[in-house]
Image (cartoon, grey):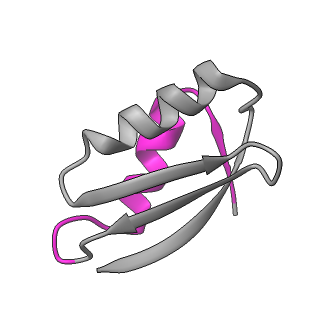
Amino acid sequence: MSKTIVKVEGMSCGHCVATVEGGLAKVTGVERALVNLENKEVTVEYDESKVKISDIEANIEELGYDVIK
């Protein structure tokens, strides 16, 4: 299991948290996603044999948020 922190712009409320965490929970290989609004971060635990970080970032962008690289 791997863990990464993704910087994300555009999250501002509980609805945003639910959208991002819920959206990532549907991605095969993602075990856990936890949003920190204050730091504008999403901590993601994932199985790197099933999903790549680029896929996780793309999913966040598809949900309507900007990934900061």
Residue at (52% x, 73% y) in the render: 4
Question: x%, y% of residue 22?
Answer: 38, 33
Question: x%, y% of residue 34?
Answer: 52, 51
Foreground: 9 or 41? 41
Q: Is residue 63 magenta?
A: yes
Q: Is residue 35 magenta?
A: no
Residue 10, located in which quarter of the rendered image? top right
Region in magenta: 49-68
How many numbered marks does the figure carry?
0
Q: Quadrant location of the N terminus?
A: bottom left
Residue at (18% x, 52% y) in the render: 28
Residue at (72% x, 24% y) in the render: 13
Q: Quadrant location of the C terminus?
A: bottom right
- Image height of 19 relative to 34, above or below: above
Foreground: 10 or 58? 10
Question: x%, y% of residue 61?
Answer: 53, 38
> In the image, is 31 to the left or to the right of 39?
left
> In the image, is 57 to the left or to the right of 26?
right
Residue at (25% x, 39% y) in the render: 26
Q: Residue furthest top?
A: 15
Question: x%, y% of residue 9?
Answer: 75, 41
> In the image, is 26 to the left or to the right of 13?
left
